[in-house]
C-alpha cells in the first residue's frame, strides 16, 4: 500500500470504520470458549433482529429441505445464525491471534489425497464452499500447503478490506488473487502453487450456466474449469466444518480426474460435494446469502 493510500485511510469519514476494527480486535482477545458462548447469544439475537437475512435463510432452507416443517426450519435458521456468528468471532481470532495451537487439534481427512496432488508438481486447485468458519479455516487448510493462495472479493470499505486481508495474509505467506487475476493465478499454479477457491457463487445477470443444487437450477461459475484446463493443476474438493462438539474438521477429497474438460460436469462435481457436506451438518453453510439469486429464463424467482 502506498503512503498516499495509507494516509487516505485515516480520513475522518473512515473513523467509524476504524472504531469497528478496534472493537473487533478487542473481541479477538477473548478466550475461544468465551467467543463461542458470546457467539451463541449474539447469533440468537441477530436471528430475531436481522429479519431480511432470516427470510433469505428461511427461503433457502425451504427450497433445499422441503421435508422440514416450519418449526424445524425456524430452528435451523436460528442455528445457522449462531454458527455464522461464531464463525465471524472465530475469524477475528484468525486475524489477530496465534493459530498454531489449533493446527494439531484439527481433524484432517484425506491428507493423502492432497499429498498425491502435490507430488504431481503441477499445482493444486482446492474448490469448496462458504461454510461458517471460512476465515478461521484458511490457516487450518494452508498449514498443509507448500505455497498457498486464495481467491477473494475485495471489501467495498477500504479500512475493513485492509483488516480482513492483512489478517488473512499473515499466515504462511499466503498469496491473494481477485477473480480478475486469472492469468497470474494460472502462472502461480503452473509453478506448483495451491489456490483455494470458494466457487459456490452466483454472479446475477452474468450467469450463463445453471446446474442443480439440492434439486434447484442454480447459477454457477465456470472459471474453476478454465483455471484447471489452462494450468494443468490437480483439482481437489475441500470442506471445513465446526463439529457439534466444538472441534474442527478439514476434508480433502480424492483428485477429481478429468476436471476442466466439461464445465457442466465440473460444476455438478462440486455442487454434489458441497451438497453432501451440507447434509451432514446443515447449520454450517452460509444460508444467509442468496445462493439462488439468478434464475434460468422463464423460471420463477426464489426470493
Image (tube, helix red, strand yellow):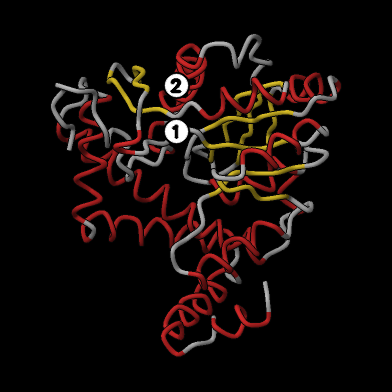
Q: Tell me if I can see residue 104 in this picture.
A: no
Q: Tell me if I can see residue 72 in this picture.
A: yes
Residue at the extreme bottom: 12
User: What crowding class fits label 1: few (fewer than 14 Cα within 10 Å), some (14-19), or many (20 or more)?
Assistant: some
The N terminus - image quarter: bottom right
Asked whether the beta carbons under mark 1 and mark 2 sit within 8 Å of each other, the answer is: yes
Q: Secondary structure at mark 1?
A: loop
- Residue at 44% from the left image edge and 21% from the top image edge: 271
Tell me: residue 70, above or below residue 93: above
- Residue at 54% from the left image edge and 43% from the top image edge: 179
Q: Secondary structure at mark 2?
A: helix
Tell me: residue 272, above or below residue 19: above
Displayed quadrant of residue 206: top left
Q: Horizontally, is 126 left or right of 291 in the view?
A: right
Mark 1 and mark 2: span between their CA atoms? Answer: 8 Å
For disc 1, the marked residue is 200
Amino acid at each position: 500500500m502506498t503512503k498516499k493510500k495509507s494516509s487516505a485511510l485515516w480520513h475522518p469519514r473512515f473513523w467509524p470504520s476504524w472504531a469497528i476494527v478496534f472493537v473487533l480486535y478487542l473481541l479477538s482477545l477473548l478466550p475461544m470458549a468465551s467467543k463461542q458462548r458470546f457467539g451463541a447469544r449474539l447469533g440468537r439475537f441477530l436471528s430475531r433482529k436481522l429479519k431480511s437475512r432470516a427470510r433469505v435463510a428461511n427461503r433457502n432452507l425451504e427450497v433445499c429441505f422441503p421435508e422440514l416443517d416450519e418449526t424445524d426450519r425456524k430452528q435451523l435458521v436460528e442455528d445457522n445464525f449462531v454458527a455464522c456468528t461464531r464463525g465471524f468471532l472465530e475469524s477475528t481470532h484468525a486475524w489477530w491471534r496465534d493459530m498454531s495451537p489449533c493446527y494439531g487439534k484439527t481433524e484432517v481427512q484425506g491428507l493423502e489425497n492432497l499429498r498425491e496432488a502435490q507430488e504431481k508438481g503441477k499445482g493444486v486447485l482446492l474448490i469448496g464452499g462458504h461454510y461458517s468458519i471460512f476465515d478461521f479455516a484458511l490457516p487450518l487448510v494452508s498449514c498443509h500447503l507448500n505455497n498457498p493462495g486464495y481467491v477473494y472479493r475485495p471489501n467495498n470499505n477500504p479500512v475493513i478490506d485492509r483488516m480482513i486481508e492483512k489478517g488473512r495474509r499473515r499466515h504462511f505467506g499466503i498469496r491473494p488473487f481477485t477473480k480478475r487475476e486469472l492469468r497470474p493465478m494460472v502462472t502461480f499454479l503452473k509453478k506448483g502453487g495451491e489456490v483455494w477457491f470458494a466457487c459456490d457463487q452466483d454472479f446475477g445477470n452474468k450467469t450463463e450456466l445453471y446446474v442443480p443444487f439440492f434439486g434447484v437450477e442454480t447459477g454457477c461459475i465456470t472459471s474453476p474449469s478454465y483455471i484447471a484446463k489452462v494450468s494443468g493443476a490437480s483439482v481437489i474438493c475441500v470442506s471445513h466444518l465446526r463439529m457439534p462438539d466444538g472441534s474442527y474438521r478439514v476434508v480433502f477429497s480424492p483428485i477429481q480426474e478429468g476436471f476442466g474438460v466439461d464445465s457442466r460436469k465440473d460444476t455438478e462435481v462440486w455442487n454434489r460435494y458441497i451438497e453432501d457436506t451440507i447434509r451432514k451438518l446443515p447449520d454450517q453453510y452460509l444460508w444467509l446469502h442468496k445462493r439462488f439469486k439468478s434464475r434460468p429464463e422463464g423460471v420463477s424467482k426464489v426470493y
